Image: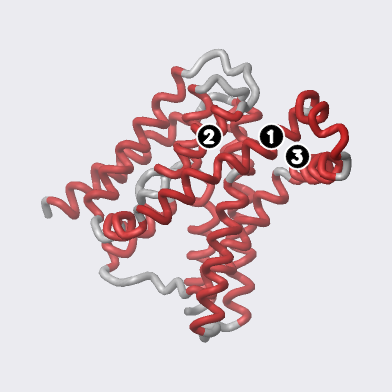
Amino acid sequence: MDFIEAILLGILQGITEFLPVSSSGHLVLAQALLGRELDRGITFEVVVHFGSLFSILVIFRERIKLLIVTAFRFISDPKNMADNWKNQYNVRFIFYVLLSMIPAMFVGLLLKDYIEAAFASPVLVSCMLLVTGALLYSTQYSYRNDQDVTALKGFIMGIAQALAIMPGISRSGTTITTGLFLRLKRSEVADFSFIMLLPVLAGAMLLEFLDILETGFEGVATGELTVAFFASFISGVIALKYLIKLLKGKSLHYFAWYCWLVGVSGIIYFGFL
């Protein structure tokens, strides 16, 4: 892997991880189009995922800091846990994030083989991009977004995140769309959608790191890994800021046209040509 490829793959990770266009779907189509596996070793995957993780930490640093402080205060005051649970929304918010992890854990464990098989079909991925486009287009019809997250709504968003394991289904697009139709405040949709990704992303990185311990570090130069990390981190920050701006401006549905264009093109190219 050279510097140019490391930068391009890092940018691909950073942008598609957060913009509602499905990073896994783009990777499948790119591999099928090029006729080869893109050179993304397990060590490289850990590094670029670190870049994405840091992007979330930077953009949502104030909310994350508040949640961490709130969690420590809640744990250190067992006598008033019941009152704090009732009166402090951020205490419940933390629980809702943890609750949202459950569907993805079950889907990842029980349907792993089916999901891996889906990665081998560019036509299926293209069809899933059409579904993503339909979800994004529907967001312009969501009204009265004035509510906070609840346990039920957090769990439903967790189910949406689990369904987005399918390549071609955008994780951010699916969870944000679900949150909007659950009438959540747009600021809360953005916060919850990406903060709920943190434990999932951390879990994926842990599994990748365990694989590294078994197989050993791959021969990717430190320089290439460094530029890949910063490419993923910087592009992730830009993508997150842009997506939040679009969400506030109710312009998320514009991405539907892109997903439809790529999806239809993929069906025609891989299915008929």
Query: Would you say the residues marked 3 and 2 are in contact, meaning their CB atoms lie under 8 Å apart?
Result: no
Q: What residue type is labelled 1?
A: Phe
Q: How far apart are marks 2 and 1 (CA)?
A: 12 Å
- Asked whether 144 or 16 is in front, the reply is 144
Q: Please state which of the two labelled residues, at mark 1 or mark 3, is closer to the viewer.
A: 1
Few, some or many C-alpha atoms within 10 Å of disc 1 (few <14, some 14-19, many ≥20)?
some
Residue labelled with disc 2: 155
Q: Residue furthest top?
A: 144
272 horizontally vs 20: left or right: left
Image point (64%, 29%), residue name: 188
Image point (44%, 53%), residue name: 23
Q: Which numbered tag is attached to residue 54?
A: none
User: x, y percentage for residue 5?
Assistant: 47, 71
Q: Tell me which colouring the rendered structure shows.
A: secondary structure
Image point (64%, 50%), residue name: 237
On-image quarter of the C terminus: bottom left
Number of numbered tags placed on the structure image: 3
User: x, y percentage for residue 133?
Assistant: 36, 35
Residue labelled with disc 1: 93
Q: What residue type is labelled 3?
A: Arg
